């Protein structure tokens, strides 16, 4: 619930009321009633009512203060959860693999290293899952825009960064990289 202040631009009346804060879980009829109350003056029924949160009346102050306290409590719980779970990665053999990182070029994701490339280094294979695990400096290709990306380690988490023009030139000399990009583009229907 929220306490509101309505000011009519036409008749000049100012009035206060409490109402639902959102329309979640409401029927169509209830939603229409809420929209009408938030847009039409209850005295002259003109549309274009100016509505703002009431922080002037006692009821408005109570609602506002309870909202501030609730927001602070929720923020505190979220911060505690962040401290308990410092990484949002998937644990494999006591290392975190990136989970939820998006491509820095196109913004799509998450990218989890499944298009990672072993271009000359020894493969790092998980003993439990037999998955190839990316490490700091390993190359991957965005499966959405085919950008060449590098894994970079920040703390105990891997993030992604785009390859520099020089790195792109070097990587594109590798036929495996060119074939992977061409395959991804064919799958996506790109030229």
Image (tube, rainbow, N blue to C red):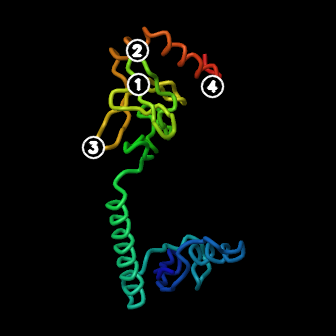
Q: Secondary structure at mark 1?
A: strand
The part of the image, by quadrant, that contains residue 69 is bottom left
Total marks in image:
4
- Taking the spot 37% from the left edge, 45% from the top edge, the residue there is 94
Q: Residue at x 36, y 76 (%)?
A: 68
Q: Label 1 to label 3, Cα distance in Å?
A: 19 Å
Mark 2 near mark 4, Cβ–Cβ under 8 Å? no
Q: Find disc 2 in the rendering and name its residue.
A: 171
Q: Which quarter of the picture shows residue 137?
A: top left
Dot 1 or dot 3, earlier in sequence: 1
Query: x and y percent of residue 56 in the render?
Result: 36, 85
Q: Which mark is residue 188?
A: 4
Residue lying at the far front of the rendered structure: 127
Q: State the residue position of label 3.
A: 155
Left or right placement of residue 139 versus residue 142 in this view: left
Q: Position of residue 161 (x, y in %)?
A: 36, 31
Name the residue that disc number 1 marks: 139
**Labels 4 & 1 near each other (Cβ < 8 A):** no
- Which of the two labelled residues, at mark 4 and mark 1, occupies the earlier sequence position? 1
- Counting residues from the start of the chain, the first of labels 2 and 3 encountered is 3
Whether the residues at callouts 2 and 1 have beta carbons within 8 Å, the answer is yes
Query: Residue 168: x and y, percent?
Result: 39, 16
Residue nearest the viewer, comparing 175 with 128: 128
In the displayed structure image, the side of residue 143 where residue 167 appears, left or right: left
Helix, strand or loop status at disc 3? loop
Front tag of 2 and 3: 3
- What is the CA distance from the residue labelled 4 to the residue labelled 1? 21 Å
Q: Find the residue positioned furthest to the bottom.
A: 58
Disc 2 from disc 1: Cα separation: 9 Å
Is residue 62 shown above or below 94?
Answer: below
Mark 2 / mark 4, whichever is N-terminal = 2
What separation in Å lies between label 2 and label 3 (alpha carbons)? 26 Å
């Amino acid at each position: 619930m929220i306490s509101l202040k309505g000011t009519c631009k036409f008749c000049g009346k100012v009035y206060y009321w409490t109402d639902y804060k959102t329309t979640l879980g409401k029927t169509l009829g209830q939603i229409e009633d809420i929209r009408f109350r938030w847009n039409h003056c209850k005295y002259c029924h003109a549309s274009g009512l100016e509505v703002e949160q009431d922080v002037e009346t006692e009821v408005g102050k109570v609602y506002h203060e309870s909202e501030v306290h609730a927001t602070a409590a929720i923020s505190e719980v979220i911060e505690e959860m962040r401290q308990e779970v410092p990484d949002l990665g998937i644990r494999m053999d006591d290392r975190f693999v990136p989970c939820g990182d998006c491509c820095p070029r196109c913004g799509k994701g998450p990218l989890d290293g499944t298009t990672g490339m072993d271009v000359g280094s020894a493969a790092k294979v998980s003993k439990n899952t037999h998955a190839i695990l990316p490490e700091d400096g390993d190359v991957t290709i965005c499966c959405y825009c085919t950008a060449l990306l590098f894994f970079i380690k920040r703390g105990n988490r891997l993030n992604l960064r785009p390859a520099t023009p020089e790195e792109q030139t070097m990587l594109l000399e590798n036929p495996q990289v060119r074939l992977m990009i061409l395959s991804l583009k064919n799958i996506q229907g790109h030229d």
